[in-house]
Amino acid sequence: KQCDPRWGSNMMGVPGAGPGEHATICKEGCAMSSLSMALRGLDQQVGGADADPGVVNAWLAAHDGYVCAGGDCNNLVLAAPQNISSMLHLVGEVPTPAGPTIAKQLADASAIYLAHVHNQGHFVLLVAAADAAGTAFTVRDPFYNTTTYAHADIHDTIVYRVA
C-alpha cells in the first residue's frame, strides 16, 4: 500500500524542482505504487532491490522519472519504467480498451494496465478479468481496500506491453 509506514511519508516527484506541488507517496503515489506492484509481479528488481514503492520512487527521482506538469511535479514519466525493466515497453496512456481485449492481455500476461479510476483521481493495477467479457477486473489498489472495479469505472489506462 502506498501509505505503508516504510515509505508512505517519502517525498516523491522531481527533486529540487522550483514551483510546483511535491507530495508524499501516501498522498499522490498511486500510479507509481501500482507500477511497483507490477514490477514485483514480474519478479523485476530495481537497482538490485525488490520493487516496492520506496525503492521505485527513489529510482525514479534519481533517473528523471518524474515530470512537472500543470503545477504538479509528481507525474510519472510514462516511458521511465522501460529503463527499469527491459520487459516493459510503453504503449501509452490511452482510452480504455474494450473489456475482452484487456481480459485477454491480462490472461496471457502480454500487457500491464494501470487503470485510472475514481473520476481520474486514482490509479490501480489491473490483475485479472472477473469474467471473460471483461465487464469487471480484479485489481491491486494501492490506497483503497477495493479488490474489483467495473470496466465502466475505468476512465483511461497506462499500458505497457510485456516482452
Image (tube, helix red, strand yellow):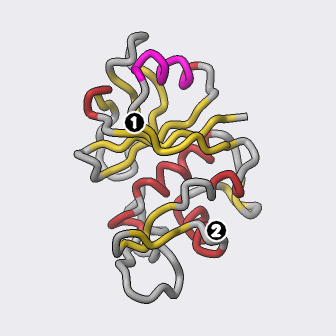
Residue type at mark 1: give it: Pro
Indicate yes or no whether the magenta region holds residue 16. no
**Is 148 on the left-hand or right-hand side of 162?**
left
Give left or right: position of 90 versus 121: right
The quarter of the picture where residue 4 lies is bottom left
> Which span is picked out in magenta?
98-106
Q: Nearer the viewer, residue 137 or 116?
A: 116
Where is residue 135? Give x, y as percent: 32, 18
* Circle 2: residue type: Trp
Tell me the chief SS of the magenta region. Answer: helix
Q: Which of 153/93 is in front?
A: 93
Q: Which residue lies furthest to the left in this view?
A: 119
Q: What element carries label 1?
A: strand
Identify the residue shown where x is 62% and y is 71%: 64
Q: Residues within 10 Å of mark 1 (few under 14, many from 20)?
A: few
Sequence-wise, the earlier of marks 1 and 2 is 2
Residue 139 position in % (x across, y down):
40, 35
The relative height of residue 148 versus residue 53 in the rendered view (above or below) is above
Residue 80 rendering spot, x and y as whole percentages: 62, 58
Callout 1 touching callout 2 (CB < 8 Å): no
Q: Residue at x 29, y 39 (%)?
A: 146
Q: In this view, does 54 lie to the left or right of 25?
A: right
Residue drawn at the location 72% of the way across and 42% of the way down: 87
Judge the density around disc 2: few (<14), some (14-19), many (≥20) Cα neighbours within 10 Å.
some
Residue at (48, 68) in percent of width and height: 6
Q: Is residue 101 magenta?
A: yes
User: Dot 2 lies on which element?
Assistant: helix
Numbered circles on residues, count: 2
Residue 2: which numbered mark, if any? none
Which mark is drawn over residue 95?
Answer: 1
Residue at image mark 2: 59
Structural distance between the alpha carbons of marks 1 and 2: 28 Å
